[in-house]
Image (cartoon, rainbow, N blue to C red):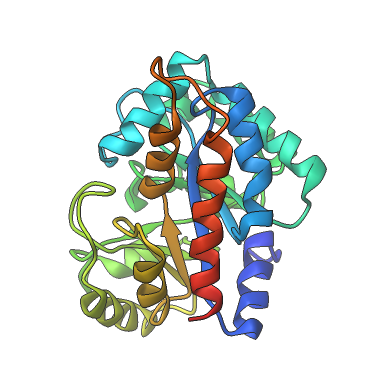
C-alpha cells in the first residue's frame, strides 16, 4: 500500500508525542443505534486515538462473554451492516481525522456481498479492517481487494505465533499489527506485562509496523504498564462491560450509559498521556 492512511498518520503523530495510542473497541449498535452513535461521536473527545467498531455477529468465536453479549444486544436492537456503515458516515461528518477500523468476522461481509462492502466501507470513511477468521492463506479473498482500495488490513499475532508463522502474518498487514496478549478469548484474563513486552520486542525485529496490544486490558494501570513496551493499547471488553453495567432492568440504555463509557475512556487516555 503506497498511500498514507489515517492510521499511518495517527501513529506517526503519536510517535512524535512519544506516547502509545489508545485504541478503543465498542460494538456498533450496542445497546441501541442512538446510544451507540452518541458513544462513537464522544470517543475522540474522551481521548480515543483510534476506534475499532465491532460488526455484530451471532457466532463471534474469538470473543469472550462481554463482547458476545454486546453483539446480542446490538442484533436484538436491529443492528446490521448497513446501519454500521451509517454510523461511520455520521462520524465522518464530524471527524475527518480519527481512524475507524471495522472488526469482526467474514460472514457478514461475504453476504453483503464482499465487493460492494469494500466499496461502501471506503465511501463511508472506514480506514481498516480486522477480520479474525480470514487467514493469510486466503488473502486473495478479502485482504488484497481491501488493500487495493486503500483500506489497511490489520492482522493479529498471538503468543503462539512463532518465527515460522510470523512472516505469513506480516506479509500483507498494514496500518499496525494487533498483538493478542493472552491465549484465549477476549477479556478472559489479565496479560503478563513482562511477557507481552518480550513478545513485542521479538516481533519488532521483523517489522516496522506499529504494534498495538489488546485482550485483557481493563484498567488505566494495566494500560499504562502495557504502553511502556508497545505502540498502542486496545481496550474493548472493559468498555462493553461499562455499557452493560449502565443498562436498566430491561436491558435498555439509561442516562448513565454514555457517560460511563466515556469517563472510562478519559481515565485510560490520561494514564497513557502520563506513561
Check the image and report above or below for 92 versus 155: above
Q: Position of residue 265 (x, y in %)?
A: 53, 55
Q: Nearer the viewer, residue 183 or 259?
A: 259
At x 48% / y 63%, what residue is drawn?
Answer: 268
Q: Nearer the viewer, residue 129 or 114?
A: 129
At x 29% / y 56%, what residue is drawn?
Answer: 216
Q: Position of residue 98 (x, y in %)?
A: 68, 56
The residue positioned farthest toward the right in the image shown: 93
Q: Nearer the viewer, residue 148 or 155?
A: 155
Q: Nearer the viewer, residue 39 or 11?
A: 39
Q: Position of residue 5 (x, y in %)?
A: 68, 61
At x 38% / y 49%, what residue is drawn?
Answer: 238
Residue 173 in sight from this viewpoint: yes
Residue 22 in sight from this viewpoint: no
Q: Position of residue 82 (x, y in %)?
A: 62, 22
Where residue 234 sits, quadrant-wise, is: bottom left
Check the image and report above or below for 265 versus 36: below
Classify residue 34 as left or right of residue 181.
Answer: right
Classify residue 153 as left or right of residue 73.
Answer: right
Classify residue 38 as left or right of residue 80.
Answer: right
At x 64% / y 25%, what residue is drawn?
Answer: 34
Quarter of the image with the N terminus is bottom right
Report how many numbered discs are placed on residues in the image: 0
Amino acid at each position: 500500500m503506497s498511500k498514507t492512511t489515517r492510521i499511518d498518520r495517527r501513529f506517526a503523530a503519536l510517535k512524535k508525542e512519544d506516547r502509545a495510542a489508545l485504541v478503543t473497541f465498542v460494538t456498533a449498535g450496542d445497546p441501541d443505534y442512538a446510544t451507540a452513535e452518541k458513544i462513537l461521536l464522544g470517543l475522540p473527545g474522551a481521548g480515543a486515538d483510534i476506534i475499532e467498531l465491532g460488526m455484530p455477529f451471532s457466532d463471534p468465536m474469538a470473543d469472550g462473554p462481554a463482547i458476545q453479549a454486546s453483539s446480542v444486544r446490538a442484533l436484538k436492537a436491529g443492528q446490521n451492516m448497513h446501519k454500521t456503515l451509517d454510523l461511520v458516515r455520521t462520524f465522518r461528518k464530524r471527524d475527518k481525522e480519527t481512524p475507524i477500523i471495522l472488526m469482526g468476522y467474514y460472514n457478514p461481509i461475504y453476504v453483503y456481498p464482499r465487493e460492494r462492502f469494500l466499496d461502501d466501507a471506503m465511501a463511508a470513511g472506514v480506514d481498516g479492517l480486522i477480520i479474525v477468521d480470514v487467514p493469510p492463506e486466503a488473502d486473495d479473498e478479502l485482504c488484497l481487494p481491501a488493500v487495493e482500495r486503500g483500506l489497511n488490513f490489520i492482522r493479529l499475532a498471538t503468543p503462539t505465533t512463532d518465527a515460522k508463522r510470523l512472516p505469513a502474518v506480516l506479509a500483507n498487514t498494514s496500518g499496525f499489527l494487533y498483538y493478542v496478549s493472552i491465549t484465549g478469548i477476549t477479556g478472559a484474563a489479565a496479560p503478563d506485562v513482562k511477557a507481552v513486552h518480550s513478545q513485542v520486542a521479538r516481533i519488532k525485529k521483523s517489522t516496522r509496523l506499529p504494534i498495538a496490544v489488546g485482550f485483557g486490558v481493563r484498567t488505566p494501570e494495566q494500560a499504562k504498564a502495557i504502553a511502556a513496551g508497545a505502540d498502542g493499547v486496545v481496550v474493548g471488553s472493559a468498555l462493553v462491560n461499562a455499557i452493560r453495567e449502565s443498562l436498566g432492568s430491561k436491558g435498555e440504555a439509561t442516562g448513565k450509559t454514555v457517560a460511563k463509557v466515556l469517563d472510562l475512556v478519559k481515565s485510560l487516555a490520561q494514564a497513557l498521556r502520563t506513561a
